Image (spheres, rainbow, N blue to C red):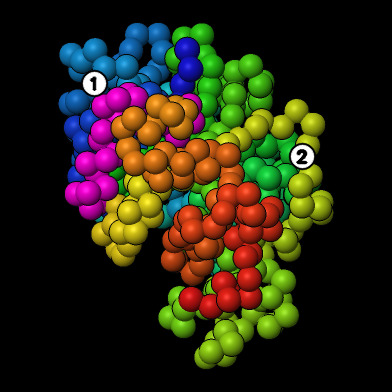
Amino acid sequence: MIIYADLHIHSKYSGATSEKMSVKELSAYAPIKGINLLGTGDVIHPLWLKELKESLEEVPGTSLYKIKNSQANLYFVAQTEIGTIHEVEGKKRRIHHVVLMPSFEVAEQVIDVFSKLCDLEADGRPVLAMNPAELIEMLLEIDSNIFIFPAHAWTPWWSIFGSIGGVDSLEECYGDKSHKIKALETGLSSDPEMNWRVSWLDRLTLLSNSDSHSPYPHRLGREVNVFNLKKPSYKELIEAIISKNPSKFLMTIEVDPAYGKYHWTGHRKCGVSMPPEEAIKRGNRCPKCGKLLTKGVEQRVEELADRPRGFKPPNAIGFKKLLPLTEIIAECMKIRGETKLYSGQVWELYMKLIRNFDNELNVLLNVNAKDLEMVVPSRIAEAIVRVREGLVTIRPGYDGVYGRLVLDVDASSVTAKERRGQASIMDFFG
């Protein structure tokens, strides 16, 4: 069975998260996206776990869950994100970790232990003042089948390799428990190709998840993992991740990293952004105000990389770069601004595609241009295919600003450098 899995999301109980992040909304939008395995998000928040238990029931023998009294082909896996704060060489390190659990009963045991350390009802993503090695030890003492991996590994804040709160190696983070870490989440601003440049990450499986704070399909499932499992179960899922067996773990689907909010180095207030080589040349200082720039993921990868661009380890799991379908439609219609992805015009065309072709991932990955043109204007059909084939350029995101798809370029003239987002010196500003 082909599984499209988004293993890291949040609930309405996490900060800066939509109130619509409920089981009802998630179960409505996940099939529209094309997801059939979804993390629960925030499973150790007592109120959210109560709602999950009211809405979901365990599928016998799988350690996964489904909507009660529903025939929908949507599974859930118990999942949360936990933050830790610890010091390395006198500097505070703030790391987020994704935690998968084999049952709600295990989640309750985690609640019993961790409620003595912090107020778990304060936020769906609790933060603990402890070394990550301690976190791993405590979780695995509760249940050895708990699976932990670093979240959005390169984001400047709250990530293992982040330029602001991170470290320079797995060992600096997890110490003598580093061998327990078997996977790493690439995050929106990096992709497997960027991570392949760091040789000591080769032993880890690269996962891609949305970290979604909203149930809508331009956020939910914007990054997913594609598995081929005989029978979906927690055990088979974890085994597929750890083994890196290409017959079981088929690929990841990534948002083009230039679309992420921290891909390039920049300064949001001044509207300035630039690639690593330009930032280094300028001493990581904003050319407008002189303040330090927020170091982007591409520059941070460059600092730790010991391989050239384009290197691919043998037997690496493949990946496909895409963009949210609503983003493509909105750009084709020249609808921009903060609310573009919620535009009625965009959603009308989006839902026409879904009604004709089942779900968004199918549209983005499989439907040919001729069939697309029978449903939407040719410009949109062409753009979908160009994104699929990597024949577009992205104005890179920086310092909390999402990147932007640029379509007004002849596809045949798009170079590899432009696909990385580095079209000209003018792109360094605003």
Residue 78: image quadrant is top left
Q: Secondary structure at mark 2?
A: loop
According to the picture, the residue beneath numbered tag 1 turns out to be 67
Q: Is residue 231 above or below residue 35?
A: above
Q: Which residue is pictured at 41% across the width and 13% down the height?
A: 62
Residue nearer the viewer, 154 or 334:
334
Q: Is residue 291 above or below residue 306?
A: below
Q: Position of residue 188 (x, y in %)?
A: 51, 50
Q: Secondary structure at mark 1?
A: strand
Q: Which residue is pictured at 52% across the width and 91% down the height?
A: 289
Task: Give whichever of discs 2 and 1 has the lower sequence position.
Answer: 1
Q: Is residue 191 left or right of residue 24?
A: right
Q: Is residue 190 left or right of residue 70?
A: right
Residue 86 visible, this orientation: no
Q: Which residue is pictured at 59% across the width and 18% down the height?
A: 248
Residue nearer the viewer, 265 or 324:
324
Q: Is residue 356 above or below residue 380?
A: above
Residue 352: image quadrant is top left
Residue range highlighted in magenta: 342-366
Q: Is residue 109 left or right of residue 229?
A: left
Residue 386 visible, this orientation: yes
Amino acid on which the number 1 mark rests in the picture = Ile
According to the picture, the residue beneath numbered tag 2 turns out to be 312
Magenta residue check for 362: yes
Q: Residues within 10 Å of mark 1 (few under 14, many from 20)?
A: many
Q: Is residue 87 above or below residue 237?
A: below
Q: Residues within 10 Å of mark 2 (few under 14, many from 20)?
A: some
